[in-house]
Image (tube, rainbow, N blue to C red):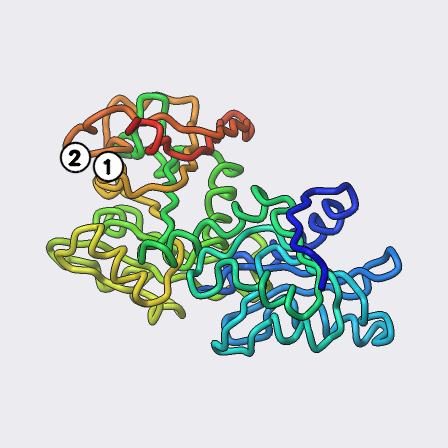
Amino acid sequence: MPPPTDKKDSTSDQRWMHLALDQAQRGVGLTSPNPPVGAVIVAQGKAIGQGYHRKAGEAHAEVEAIRDARQFNPKLLPGATIYVTLEPCCTQGRTPPCTEAIKAAGIKRVVYGANDPNPQHAGRCRDIFLLAGIEVIGGVLESECTALIRPFSKWITTGMPYVIAKAGQSLDGRITRPAGESQWITNDAARAHGRRLRMRVDAIIVGAETVRKDNPRLTLRDGSIGSGKWQPWRVVLTRSSEIPPHSHILTDEFKDRTLIMIGKDLPDVLKALAERGVLSVLIEGGGIILGQAFRERLVDEVYWYIAPRFCGGGRPSLAGPALPQSIELENLTVRPMGDNVMIHGFPAWQSQQD
């Protein structure tokens, strides 16, 4: 039996794990309530099989890659190495455990990136593989692989969905323009980038005022056709239940994907969505909901689009009672989008508590 090893990140292992990450990216937004996972099988210095998890209930990435390798050349599978972005599962769910599929294929080396946050699986694959005489290496490109499953990690450990906050605002912090002007604050490039975030999530949250004022569609556009992505839930928070009956979200082809939440606070809404298997949500507005999300520290990730204009009034991007303290973003990305600027980062909740 080979000894346990924690040797990480050799140049070769990194190369193949990057390829597995490319595969996993193809499943982002498609697999809930499962995480996106990619796998690559290597033999004689070349990739002989690749795959990713496409949808909950369908084959996991490891099984997809094994099938692909068998089609390429089944004689190369015994003794091969499999690279997986997430620790292989070892329990029976909708599909059989991947540890058994890997053993049955004759694979003799398993390299994975992120540890599985699911307590049913965490750390168990190592013992299973070592008992079968299979070498195991964990933690290759761990930070990249862990970042890929942030929504799943939060959902499986806290019972709450991962929350992305998005807004487009003027330089004076307004999300609406004066009466008689266009409803758009930001430019076409910024709006298109913001709409593509819908591809990543299972639900989109807005307030009733946003529906009444803007009549948004909240649908997938900008290259999503043919991607396999389903329409995310469109969730409207309202106190009065006064939603215009002609609203797009109540009358279009996706009207069955609209949920009206009456008189519920945002944390209760998020909890109810998590119980539906929603791993990630995008809060698109308005200012009252965004303000509550930040005040109650519910936000995990931020995309903020800023246009070079002053509105002098209108709705603020964060409305309601003042924040108890300022919020700093970490791991920042600042990107020009024409004459607009996109700021992306993660609230520094933990460091602010220290």
Say whether residue 281 is visible: no
Q: Quadrant of the C terminus?
A: top left
Is residue 103 rendered to the left or right of residue 251?
right
Residue 261 place in picture, x, y as percent: 20, 60
Classify residue 53 by image quadrant. bottom right
Residue 320 is tagged as 2
Classify residue 240 by image quadrant. bottom left
Q: Secondary structure at mark 2?
A: loop
Residue at coordinates 54% horizontally, 56% vertically from top-left?
A: 28
Report the front residue among 335 and 83. Answer: 83
Residue 346 place in picture, x, y as percent: 42, 35
Is residue 56 rendered to the left or right of residue 273?
right
Residue at coordinates 43% horizontally, 27% vertically from top-left?
A: 307
Tags 2 and 1 in contact by the CB under 8 Å rule?
Answer: yes
- Which circle's residue, 2 or 1, is located before the other in the chain? 1
User: Label 2 sits on what residue type?
Assistant: Gly
Is residue 38 rendered to the left or right of residue 255?
right
Few, some or many C-alpha atoms within 10 Å of disc 2 (few <14, some 14-19, many ≥20)? few
Few, some or many C-alpha atoms within 10 Å of disc 1 (few <14, some 14-19, many ≥20)? many
User: Label 1 sits on what residue type?
Assistant: Gly
Residue at coordinates 35% horizontally, 52% vertically from top-left?
A: 216
Q: Badge 1 is on which residue?
A: 291
Residue 12 place in picture, x, y as percent: 79, 46
Measured in 3D between alpha carbons, the distance from the residue under mark 2 to the one under mark 1, in whole angstroms, is 6 Å
